[in-house]
Image (cartoon, grey):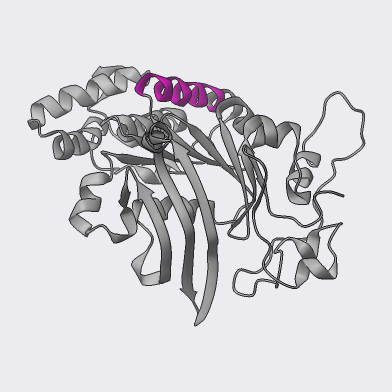
Amino acid sequence: MENEKNNKLLEIKDLEVRYRSGGRSVHAVNGVSLSVDRGEILGLVGETGAGKTTIAKSILRILPDHAIQSVSGEIIFDGEDLLKAKNNRMTAIRGYKISMIFQDPMTALNPIMPVNKQIAEGIALHMGVSKREAIERANKMLETVGISSDRGGEYPHQFSGGMKQRVVIAMALACRPDLLLADEPTTALDVTIQAQVLELIANLQKELHTAMILITHDLGVVAGVCDKVAVVYAGEILESGTKEEIFDHPKHPYTKGLFGALPDLSKKVSRLSPIDGLPPDPTNLPPGCPFAPRCPKATDECRQGAIALEALNPDHLCRCIHIDE
């Protein structure tokens, strides 16, 4: 039991996040609980607007202050509740213990600073080395991600999209963090470069034994990289478990719908099977199960109250009252 506790790096309990927008309350995250072990990769899967990025930004506490109405719950990282940590403590953690690869490398880099200096900033801040030593380490980090160190003095506009993303990865991993948050790190890249970047992230993650939360809507990426999966919808986790459980035995109608919308080259079909309808308005969520308005199995019971996330087995949780059917 003690070993299991020591292996637990991150544990989120009942996280709720509310935004303010035009005088209305936006229910972005609604009672999310999840955990990540050391060296483990968790995939957060769901449609755009499901709350995946908000969960990641809550961990780093970089949500926009002007838009936040409330944040509650617990985010226990290495035994410390980050929601209660002081600002200077979070500054020490960001980029050192927890790093983030942001979705768009085009806007994640400072356009008027050489890339090696951008990487070196975090190294100098957290590792306590001189600026010269920090630059040397930054150049070595560029080599690690497949960029020649003699390009370290160049600016972001001199790099392609794929190379910019490699720079962002180098920046995130420069201080060898315990947890890496990767927010759709390959969205802006073409398929060939996407495969290279994913392979690079996976190899570095194994080498550094860094735990990772990978945010994506691509189940193919999850299949190739992740150990565990959490399916997020309207700010809730509808289903979670090991990759094998979710892919081989999906139980929630939404999870089944996601798999049903994927092309299957072994079958001859004229068109894919999309999930009918749209995600609910987060300022006016339906009562009961948020997926009920789009669910082919929904009954009146689904719309009457909160539905608990129940364990089907130790490796598989699901939030649905019609699983047995």
**Badge count:** 0
Q: Is residue 102 magenta?
A: no
In depth, the one of 39 and 131 nearer the eye is 39
Residue 147 visible, this angle: no
Of residues 109 and 57, the one nearer the viewer is: 57
Is residue 249 shown left or right of residue 314?
A: right
In the picture shown, does residue 314 fall above or below 16?
above
59 relative to 306, above or below: above
Q: Determine the image quadrant of residue 64.
A: bottom left
Q: x%, y% of residue 149?
A: 26, 18
Q: Position of residue 85 (x, y in %)?
A: 26, 57
Most distant residue in the left direction: 130
Q: Nearer the viewer, residue 85 or 283?
A: 85
Q: Residue sitting at 10 percent across and 34 percent down?
A: 128
Tell me: 87 left or right of 230.
left
Residue 214 shows up from this direction: yes
Q: Residue at x 29, y 39 (%)?
A: 97
| Dominant secondary-structure state across the stretch colored magenta | helix
Specify whether residue 206 is painted magenta: yes
In this picture, residue 147 sits left or right of residue 191: left
Q: Which portion, as a residue range, is magenta?
A: 194-208
Q: Residue furthest front?
A: 1
Residue, x 47% and y 31% (percent of image)? 40
The N terminus is located in which quarter? top left
Q: Position of residue 207 (x, y in %)?
A: 38, 19
Give the vertical position of 271 relative to 24 (above or below).
above
Looking at the image, residue 266 sits to the left or right of residue 186; the answer is right
- Farthest residue toward the bottom? 23
Residue 281 image position (x, y, % from top left): 65, 69
**What residue appears at the point 20 percent right and 52 percent down from the top-left corner?**
89
